[in-house]
Image (cartoon, rainbow, N blue to C red):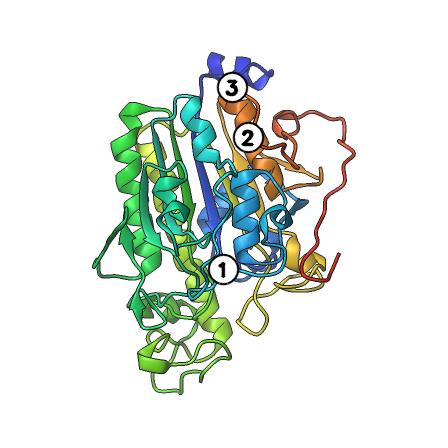
Amino acid sequence: MILFSINALGQNPKKPNIIIILADDLGWGDVGFHGSNIKTPNIDKLAKEGVILNRFYTAPVCSPTRAGLLTGRYPNRYGLRQTVIPPWSGFGLDVTEEYIPQMLKEAGYANRAVLGKWHLGHAKREFLPLQRGFTHFYGHYNGAIDYFTHKREGELDWHNDEAPSYDQGYSTDLIAEEAVKCIKKYSSQSPFFMYVAFNAPHGPLQAKTEDLLLYGFDSSKPKFGKMAGYEDTDGYGALGKGNDPRQTYSAMVTSLDRSIGRILNTLKELQIDENTLVLFQSDNGAAPNEGGTSGELRGLKFQEWEGGVRAPAIVKWPAAFKGGRTIEQVMGYIDVAPTLREIAGVKSSPAKPYDGISMLGIWKGQKKVLERDLYLGYGSIV
């Protein structure tokens, strides 16, 4: 209690464990703490105990947000202004860009894992996670994999480090299971860094029956048909369909929430939650016509309206600042790397100048609003 009180007054505790939890295409209107009827008790608890970042902005699509989050720099600086990286592309992020794990290695973070969706290039080995500062990778290189077969374009896309993995199961569950294993393994070797990039609730829309039943699934009724961009070729995306897209999407979000709960509960069980910084955010808004919503906001994924770029986001670090607050400061994905650089006490300058700025003072309760510009360009839209 005394330690917490001292830290709450603004002094830094020892270097924290850091876990970034990224949801994929989770809409602003699809979490309980924003009024959704989708069941997200673990995310809601995190919002209650942590700090809600109410004006947190991203790029309007997957790869650019992931790149900006890991580099602290706008994605148009390295060729990702307009699109994602598809399976057939030879493109990968410029290897001269510095990623968060490369920076944290300097600060003494020996274990640096990325679990889930990579989506930053795979055509050359130099683009892969283990060549970009991470010490462990478990998950998939591409977006939009099948949740049950782990295939994309007919090929298995599931890996343990750089070897194919034939683990069976629902991908959201597998990512959570690996996260729990890593936390237990790393907890005695603190501090550690984990970037947990779930593919849920990104399409193809596929859920487990137990979760579909929570939203009225009736197996005697027809399931929804093919969706644009997710054809059932060779069975891709065919498993786990509900009666309609919204029902299936809701079930996927609840599964995601349960997996997040497993991660948070493991931290508590190991008694390392006090000095573990957890940042939760979505990578962009809900995808059009795939069951997600933007609540009161206008727009969806691919658009610069707030519904496309304003993400549900929460940060929690009990040893350093009190929770139960909402911050209205404008901030976003490009601020994560510079903030973590300050938290970790990295002495060197970044390899290339950041576009983002550290938000540590704001997270701790600084009242002064930081006046800043935030560029949200995408394609021909600015």
- Name which residue lies at 58% across and 38% down: 72
Nearer to us of marks 1 and 3 is 1
- Name which residue lies at 39% across and 21% down: 108
Label 3 CA crowd tier, 10 Å (few <14, some 14–19, many 20+): some
Above or below residue 170? Residue 272 is: above
Q: Are dots 3 and 2 in contact, CB under 8 Å?
A: no
- Tag 1: residue type? Ile
Report which residue position mark 1 lands on: 85
Quarter of the figure with the C terminus = bottom right
- Find numbered disc 1 in the image and state the secondary structure of the residue it sits on: loop
- Residue 311 location (% of width, % of height): 61, 51
Residue 16 placement: quadrant: top left
Residue 174 appears left or right of 374: left
- Tag 3: residue type? Gly
In this view, the residue in front, 354 or 217, is 354
> Residue 250 shows which numbered tag?
none
Q: Could you tell me how far apart the alpha carbons at marks 1 and 3 are, in whole angstroms?
A: 33 Å
Report which residue position mark 3 lands on: 345
Q: Which one is earlier in the sequence, the residue at label 2 or at label 1?
A: 1
- Residue 110 location (% of width, % of height): 34, 27
In this view, the residue in front, 364 or 282, is 282
- Residue 212 location (% of width, % of height): 38, 70
Q: Could you tell me how far apart the alpha carbons at marks 3 and 2 are, in whole angstroms?
A: 16 Å
- Tag 2: residue type? Ala
- Name which residue lies at 67% across and 61% down: 379
Residue 234 appears left or right of 285: left
Report which residue position mark 2 lands on: 351
In this view, the residue in front, 106 or 167, is 106
- Residue 75 location (% of width, % of height): 60, 48
Residue 101 placement: quadrant: top left
